[in-house]
Amino acid sequence: MHNLSDFIHHHFDKSADELGEIEKRVLAKAHERKIISTDINAALRAESSVGERLADSIARVGGSWYFIVTFLLFLVFWCVVNTIVLLTRAFDPYPFIFLNLVLSMLAAIQAPIIMMSQNRQAERDRFEAAKDYEVNLKAELEVLSLHQKIDMRVLTEIAALREDIERLHQRLPS
């Protein structure tokens, strides 16, 4: 196949205008015999802003057992210091109103950051699915192309065998 339109017509029952952007890109790469797979992590890292990377880091730490255990130890320490150690001069006596304020502010800041990270994960999943589709489509095209080459080779060999048989029949006495 000499040009891309022949390649498209040969592999699809559509014209080039009827194909989607992804199919056109995959067909062009397949026709040029170029690799289509990419390093998804590197591609996403290159596109992410400082704020997005920071949100991912905060969500990674905030959703870890290390954070939960450390924060639990901090809460126990706070309560012990303000009830036992500083009996007469506690800076946040029971019912720990200042601690509640700090926890509320932390939750108010942490929740949107985690939501941003979850949105980025959903975006990453969509990006991965699109890349998987492209790679699968190219692999399918390559398999079809190999089938066609094998079929053509088999047909050529059958034709050559047929000619050999006809020549043998012509040489044999009747």
Image (cartoon, rainbow, N blue to C red):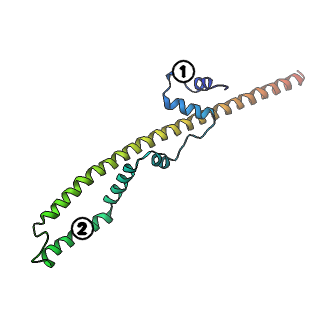
Which SS class for mark 2? helix
Which is closer to the viewer, label 1 or label 2? 2
Neighbours of disc 2 within 10 Å: few (<14), some (14-19), many (20+) = few
Amino acid bearing label 2: Leu
* Residue at horizontal 57 percent and vertical 31 percent from the top: 27
Task: Quadrant for residue 73, please give it.
Answer: bottom left
Check disc 2 and report the residue beneath it: 72
* Residue at horizontal 24 percent and vertical 69 percent from the top: 74
Amino acid bearing label 1: Ser
For residue 173, above or below residue 74: above
For residue 112, above or below residue 27: below
Residue 106 in the image: state x and y as whole percent.
Answer: 23, 57
Residue 28 in the image: state x and y as whole percent.
Answer: 58, 31
Residue 123 in the image: state x and y as whole percent.
Answer: 39, 43
For residue 155, above or below residue 49: above
Neighbours of disc 1 within 10 Å: few (<14), some (14-19), many (20+) = few
Label 1 and label 2: CA atoms lie apart by 63 Å
Task: Quadrant for residue 122, please give it.
Answer: top left
Q: Are marks 1 and 2 in contact (CB under 8 Å)?
A: no
Relative to 107, 61 lies left or right: right
**160 or 137, which lies in front?**
137
Label disc, if present, on residue 15 of the rendered structure: 1
For residue 36, above or below residue 8: below
